[in-house]
Image (spheres, rainbow, N blue to C red):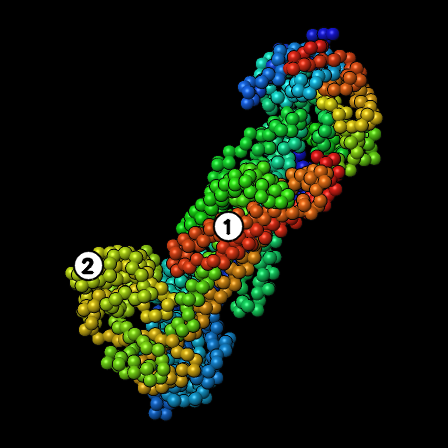
Amino acid sequence: MAATRFALRNLRRDLKSGELAVLLLALLVAVGSLTAVGFFTDRIGRAVNQQAGEVLAADLRLESARDIDAGYDTEARRLGLRVARILSMPSVVFHDEASSLVALRAVGEGYPLRGRLKIADVPFGPARPTEAIPGPGEAWADSRLLARLGVPVGARLAVGAHEVKVTQVLDYRPDQGAGFADLSATLMINVADVPATELIQPGSRVSRAVLFAGDPADIAQFREYLRTRKQPGERLQAIEDASPQIRASSDRAGRFLSLASLVSVLLSAVAVAMAARRYATRHLDSVALMKCMGASQGFVLRQTLVQLVCIAVIVTLLGTALGYLAQAGLAWLLRDLIRSDLPPPGVSTAWLGLVTAVTILIGFALPPLLQLKRVPPARVLRRNLEPPPLRYAAVYLFAIGSVLALLYWMVRDGQLVSVVAAGVGGTFLALAIAGWLLVKALTPLRRGVGVAWRYGLANIARRGRDSVVQIVAFGLGLMVLLLLALVRDDLLRDWRASLPADAPNYFMINIRPDEGEAIRAFFHERGLPPTALVPLVRARLTAVNDVSVDQLRFESERARNFVEREANLTWAQALRDDNRLVSGAWWSEADGGGARISVEQEYAQRLGLKLGDTVTYDVAGEPVTARITSLREVRWDSFQPNFFMVFSPGVLDDVTGTLITSVHVRPEQRPALVDLVRQFPEVTIIDIAALLSQVRDVMDKAALAVQYVFLFTLAAGLMVLLAAVQATRDERRYESAMLRTLGASRRVVFQGVAAEFTALGLLSGLLAACGATVVGYYLAREVFNLRYAPDPWVWVVGVIGGAFLVGIAGVLAARSAVTQPPVETLRQA
Amino acid sequence: MQANRMDTVLEAVRVGKQVSSPEGMLAILSDVSFAIARGETVAVMGASGAGKSTLLALLAGLDEPTSGKVCLADRELTSLDEDGRAAVRARHVGFVFQSFHLVPSLTAVENVMLPLELAGRRDARSAALEVLGRVGLAERVGHYPRQLSGGEQQRVAIARAFVTRPDVLFADEPTGNLDAATGERIMELLFGLNAETGATLVLVTHDQALAARCGRIIRLDAGRIVET
C-alpha cells in the first residue's frame, strides 16, 4: 500500500517535472501512431472489403432457381440489415423486327446494396454513377444491346407481354462480375414490371437472388443463420467468395498496410527502450538514495510496477484518443481523394492501444527499469557503483519475442512477420558488428582530421558500446524507413506493371471455332492487337480418384460451389507466361502421354486435390478422366483468359467448345466493337474496363493509405532518433561545458557534435540501405511474388539522408547543451 | 574512550573489506573494531583512500564487509540481507552527504518528505514543513534544488536526515562542497539538531577543526585504525 501511494505520488512528480516526458512521448507516439494506423487501416480495409463486396452488390447474396422464402428478408431486417431482391432470366427483346437475346435483370428498391450503378446518355458514351434504378415502365439497356438492335435511347422494347422505354444506357453494375455467368447484353427493368411481362412460367430459367448488406458482425451472424436454414438449391455467397481478381488485389492491399504498421511497432518499441534506459540511468541515484533511507528491493519493484501500470493506462487513453483524432484528421484530409465514404472504425482497434502499450512497456521498458531494484545503496557514497549489468541477450530476446507476438497478433501472417523479423534481426547483427568495427577503425582516422572531427570521432570511440547501440538504433530506424519506401515503391511499380495501360479491357467469348480466322482478320483490319484464341469447354466435375463428388466432403462453402458450378476447361500445349508451375512438371513429348491435367494451386487446395490424383469430368455427356501432373500459380490480374483446369492436348480437342480471347481496345477504337457485334452476333463482348477501373480504384486507395501510414512511421522513426540523442544529452551537456571552459568556441563544439552524428548517420545509412535491399528482395520475391530490381536511390537516400538526418537531429538536440552557460552545468554536475 | 556495552548503538568487530583489482585482492579495511555509544559524536578521519567512505558504508549497512561484523541498534547488520539492512536504516539511520544528494525533480519539502513517504507516514508533509522551518527554510519549501544555494541545499539534506528522528546520523564530508562560512553555519545546525534529538553522530571529515568538535576521533590509515 505504501509502495502504491509512494509510486503514485512519485509518478505525479515525475510527470510534473518532465522526467518521464521522453518515455511517455515515445509511448504516446507508439500507441497513437499504431492506433491511428489501426483505426485508419481498419476503415480502409472495410472500404476495400466493401468495394470487393461490390462484386456481389451486397455483403451476402443468396441465389436460387426457385422462390426464396420472404422470411429471410424479415429476419435480416430484424437484425438491421438492408435487403434487396433481384431476378434474372435469359429472354428475347424485340424492336420492330429486330430482336436480341438479353440477360433480363429485374431489380428492386435499394439495389445495389454495395457499389453504384453507372449510366450513360448514349451507347459507349461517358458514364456517371447514379443512386437510382429504372422506374416502372422504364428500362436501362447495355450499349451492346442498343448496337445489336440498332436503336437509340428512348426506343420502346417489347419484353414478353410488356413494353418498356429505354431511358438510359447501362454502363456498369457492381455485380456484373468477372465470371462468365452474365455475358449476354443486360436489360435492366424494375421488379414491379415482372408480372406484366408474363415471362415467369413453369419451366422458365429464372434465377432469383436476395441481397443483404450491413454491419460485419450482423452479417456474420446472419450468414450463420442462412447457412443452417438455407434450402437445397439455395447458394450462399459472401465477399470472400468474390472474384479472384478482386481478392488478389485486396489481399495485397492488406499485406501492404500491415507491413506499414509493423514498421511503426518496431520503431516505437526501439524509442521506448531507449527512453526507458535513460529514465533508469537518471534514477540510479534517487533509487540508491531511497534504498539508503530504507526502501527494500520489493518496495522499489512494487513502485516501479505500479508506475508502469499507471503509465500504460495513461498512454492507452491518451494514445488511443490521439490515434482516433489522427485517423479522423487523416480521413478528413483525404475526403476528396477517397470517393466512397469510409465506414467508421471497429471498436476492437481500441484494444490495440492497450495491448501495444502493455507489450512495449513489458518488452522494452521493464528490463531497464527492473535494474533499478538492483542498484547498490552504497552508490550514494561512490557514484561509480552500478547495478549488475543487464543480460542484454536475454533482454533483447524477450523484447523481440514480445514485439513479434504483437506483430503476429496484428497481422496474423507468420510468413510476413518472420521475413520482417529475419531482416531486422540480420541488420541488427550486421549493424552491431559494423558499429564495433567503426569504433575500432576510428583511432587511425582521428590523426588526419581537424579538431572538431577529432572530438566527434573520439566521442564515438570513447562511448564504445553506447555508440554501437546508437548505430544499431539509427540503422534499424533508417532501414525500416527505407524498407517501407523500397517495398512500397516496388509493389506499386509491379502492380502498375502487372496492369499496364494496355491490359486487356474486353473479353470476347462464345466465338465459334470456325469463326476464329474471321475474328482474327477483323481485328487486323480494325487495327486491334493480334489475339490468341483460347479453347473453352464447359463441363461438370463428377469424380475425384474415382470417388463421386457427391460422396466427397469439402471443407468450405466455396469448394462446394466450385464443384456445383459448371467448370470452364481448356487445353494448351505450352504453359502461359502469367502461369507458374509450383509443383509437378508440364507435359512434354517424353512423359508417356495420356490424359493429364494442370490445376491452379488454390483451386487444388480448396478441393483437396494433389499431384497424381485423377479427376473425372462430364464433358457433353462423356466422362473424361485425367491425372494431375502439375499445380500452377496463376496471375489472375493479368486479365488474360485463365483457367483453373488446363488439359494436355489431345483430350478435349475434338469436343465442340467455343473460343475465348481478351483484347485491349483503345477508347477511339470502341466503335469497332459495335461493328463486331453486328458482324458476329453470337460473339459476346464483356467490358472488363469497368472491372479494371474497380481494381485500380482499390489499389489506389490502398497505396494512398500506405503513404499516409508511412507518415506515422516516419514520426515514429524520428522519435527513435530523438530518444537516442536524448539518451546522451546529460553527458553531452557536461562535455560541452568542459570544452568551453577549456576555451573551445561554441562553433567548434557544434562542429564536433555534428561530426559525431554525421559519422554515426553515415554508417547507419550505409548499413540500413544494405539491410533494406536484402529484406526488400526477400519480401518482394517470396512474399509478394513480384520481380525485384534493386534501386540505387535506396543507397543514395540511405547514406546521404542518414548522415543529414542524424547530423541535424544531433545538433538540434545538443543545442541547449551548448547554449547553456558552462558554469551552470558544472555547478550542477 | 570506550563506550559502555549497555549504551552501545553502533559496533564494528574485526571488520575487513577486500575488493578485487587488476593486481589481485586489495584490502581497503583490515581488522577494524570499535564501539560507539548512544548520543556520542564521533569523527572518522584519514587521508584520501584511507577507507573512510568504505567504513561509513559498512557501518550504515550500505555494503557488506568481507570479514567481521557490524551491529547497529542491537541488530547484527552482517547477518541480514539487503532488505533487512534497509529496514534497519529506515528505522534508525539518517544521512547527510558531501554532494547533498537531493532529488533534482523534487522540491525542498518533497525531498524532506521522501524518507517519511518511504515509511508510509501519512503526516509526511506537515512533519517535513516543521523540520524545514527548524533549519530556516520555511520560505523556500517549494523551491527545487537547482533554485537553492549550496548551503540551502545542505540544510534541506539535514532536515531530511533529521525528519525521521534517527538514532544514528551518518555525515559524509557535510561541509566539503561549501565555503568556510557556510560550512561553519551548517555544522552549527548539525551539532545543534544532534544535541536536541540526542542522536549519535558519525562524521567523516578531513577538517581538523570540525573533528575537534566531536567527542571522539577515529583515525584511519591504509585501512587500519591508528587512533580511537
Residue A760 image position (x, y, % from top left): 56, 46
Q: Residue furthest bottom?
A: A96
Name the residue located 47 percent from the left edge and 75 percent from the top edge. Answer: A117
Q: Secondary structure at mark 1?
A: helix
Q: Which mark is residue A30?
A: none
* Position of A317 relative to B222 (above/below): below
* Position of B142 relative to B10 (above/below): below
Amino acid type, mark 1: Leu
Residue A470 image position (x, y, % from top left): 56, 43
Name the residue located 56 percent from the left edge and 22 percent from the top edge. Answer: B21
Residue B146 image position (x, y, % from top left): 75, 37
Instruction: Output the chain of dot 1.
Output: A
Mark 2 crowdedness (10 Å alpha carbons): few <14, some 14-19, many ≥20: few
Task: Say whether residue A708 is visible.
Answer: yes
Could you say which is closer to the camera, residue A100 or residue A236?
A: A100
Task: Say whether residue A730 is visible.
Answer: no
Mark 1 or mark 2: name the one nearer the start of the chain. Answer: 2
Left/right of residue A688 with respect to residue B116 in the rendered view: left
* Position of A203 relative to A386 (above/below): below
Q: Secondary structure at mark 2?
A: loop
**Location of mark 2 (residue):** A546
**Location of mark 1 (residue):** A766
Instruction: Output the chain of dot 2.
Output: A
Name the residue located 34 percent from the left edge and 61 percent from the top edge. Answer: A558
Give the quarter of the image for residue A333.
Answer: bottom right
